[in-house]
Amino acid sequence: MSEVSHSSTKSSLTYFIADLHLAQNRPDITACFLSFLKNEAPKAQALYILGDLFEYWVGDDDNSTFIAEISQAIKSLSKLDCEIYFIHGNRDFLLGQRFAKQAGMQILPEVTLINLYNKPVVIMHGDTLCTRDIGYQAFRKKSRSWWWQAIIKSLPLFIRRKIADNYRNQSASATAMKSQDIMDVTDSEVIHCLEQYQSQILIHGHTHRPAIHKVSANNQAAQRIVLGDWYEQGAWLKVTPDSMELMDSPFEINK
């Protein structure tokens, strides 16, 4: 278990985002994210990025201008007294300390307990909650192993990019054939997670189904908050000491 707490001279405000899937072929998402970093995020004490910031990540040695632009933008936010935390998603799990340092953000364990305005809150990407997706869970286990990652990272950059493109296509095809239930969380896994960390609030992404769900854990009321994706609009969770609100903003007003 990892615990995170933060303090700041700013007003009490924290943002959570996930599933941006930034890619060069989606400049609209990139523009929305850059606008968010410039205009909205500086108001916050902290920004938590809960995975799939990028559509795919082939290694910290990717020196493309696109990656550099994103890194510099996040770094600029970190210089404005906003702490930035990152949890790996299923698309960017190879993102390492080199990029994190360049971007001024801290990588957290895949499941982390944070002290959010004196409340224990569990945060994660959310893919580990989808236990009925047996095929994906098998791939996840393999791809997180040291030997698999060592093999991938040893390949030339252009080959890694081709592998990532092939994986994206295969993943899209596989997803289209799966039922929605299989790709959603398993309720019992949610309860187990909350009870394991003795928390009443779980925040995650991955399923692209933004909502605030009421559940029961530890013999009392609890919440599961799902973050939205950025495919068609900007989306974030705004948290203050007194409220939690899912926000969104159309691309056209984030210019």
Image: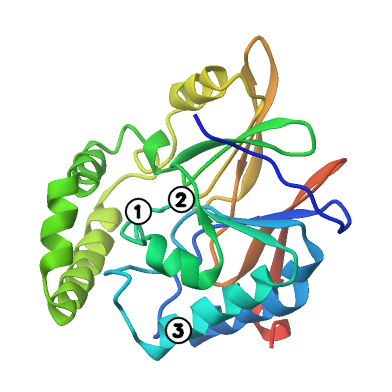
Q: Residue at x 28, y 69 (%)?
A: 59
Seen from the viewer's position, the closer of residues 31 and 229 is: 31
Report the residue marked by disc 1: 90
Q: Secondary structure at mark 2?
A: loop
> Residue 206: which numbered mark, if any?
2
Look at the image and tell me whether residue 94 can be seen. yes
**Residue type of the residue flagged with mark 3:** Ala
Query: Looking at the figure, which quarter contains the C terminus?
Result: bottom right
Q: Position of residue 95 (x, y in %)?
A: 36, 62
Q: Position of residue 178 (x, y in %)?
A: 28, 47
Disc 1 versus disc 2: nearer the observer: 1
Disc 1 crowd rating (10 Å Cα; few below 14, some 14-19, many 20+) is: many
> From the viewer's perspective, is residue 70 above or below residue 55?
below
> From the viewer's perspective, is residue 110 above or below residue 77?
above
Mark with earlier residue (1, 2): 1
Is mark 1 in CB contact (under 8 Å) with mark 2? yes
